[in-house]
């Protein structure tokens, strides 16, 4: 039964600073259910509380914390039965650790294989004109490009079909997603 609903669990991934959050806001404004990025929520909480799970200090701890939150988001979206657009997914966390050549903890591996999403994954490409850093996103543009290239390959290797979101205004980017999904 769960497999039949996973086509409604849509991932928006790609380059850090590629406009995912803005695009998600537009899709939410249009009435779509959205899930904010678990990793950003973990970073925000770690900064506020002093927890040792910041990705630039403890990538494995960060990934495990974000995976717990992402799995909860996944289960809630699955239960709702509604189309839900995720700002990144559990897959991104595994890809992040593989990019750093770190081992994948068993708990994350299990979650990775249990939580499947819609086959088409939307990828925001590197876009220097809109790229910005903040306290939660500390990657340089060059690091963001490497991350994007790795994610694009990793998603494809896992059987997903990346769809590159065009570099255009946010309304047209949202239209691209809606039209690609046939909604």
Image (cartoon, rainbow, N blue to C red):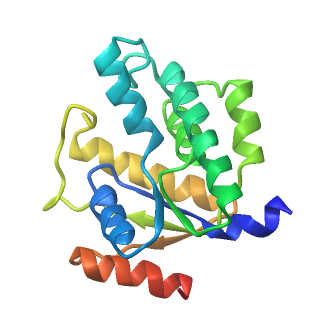
- What residue is drawn where x is 29% and y is 83%? 172
Instruction: Where is residue 29? Give x, y as percent.
Output: 33, 70
In the image, taking residue 145 as reference, residue 111 lies left or right, namely right
Quadrant (top left, top right, bottom left, bottom right) of the N terminus: bottom right
Q: Quadrant of residue 41?
A: top left
- What residue is drawn where x is 54% and y is 82%? 181
Work out whether residue 98 or residue 77 is closer to the camera in this orientation and state it.
Answer: 77
- What residue is drawn where x is 54% and y is 26%? 65
Work out whether residue 64 or residue 44 is closer to the camera in this orientation and state it.
Answer: 44
Q: Quadrant of residue 140?
A: top left
Instruction: Where is residue 103? Give x, y as percent.
Output: 63, 24
Instruction: Where is residue 132? Give x, y as percent.
Output: 16, 48
Instruction: Where is residue 54? Give x, y as percent.
Output: 38, 21
In the image, taking residue 152 as reference, residue 7 lies left or right, namely right
- What residue is drawn where x is 38% and y is 70%? 27
In the image, taking residue 92 as reference, residue 74 lies left or right, namely right
Q: Is residue 101 visible?
A: no
């Amino acid at each position: 039964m769960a497999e039949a609903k996973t086509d409604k669990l849509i991932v928006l991934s790609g380059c850090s600073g590629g406009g995912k959050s803005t695009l998600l806001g537009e899709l939410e404004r249009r009435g779509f259910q959205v899930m904010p990025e678990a990793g950003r929520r973990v970073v925000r909480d770690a900064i506020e509380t002093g927890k040792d799970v910041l990705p630039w200090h403890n990538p494995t701890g960060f990934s495990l914390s974000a995976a717990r939150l992402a799995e909860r988001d996944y289960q809630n979206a699955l239960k709702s039965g509604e189309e839900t657009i995720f700002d990144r997914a559990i897959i991104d966390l595994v890809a992040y650790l593989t990019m750093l050549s770190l081992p994948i903890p068993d708990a994350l591996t299990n979650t990775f294989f249990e939580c499947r999403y819609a086959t088409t994954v939307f990828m925001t490409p590197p876009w220097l004109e809109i790229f910005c850093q903040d306290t939660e996103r500390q990657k340089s543009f060059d690091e963001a490009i490497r991350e994007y290239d790795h994610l694009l390959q990793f998603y494809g290797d896992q059987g997903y079909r990346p769809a590159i979101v065009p570099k255009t205004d946010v309304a047209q980017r949202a239209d691209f997603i809606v039209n690609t999904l046939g909604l």
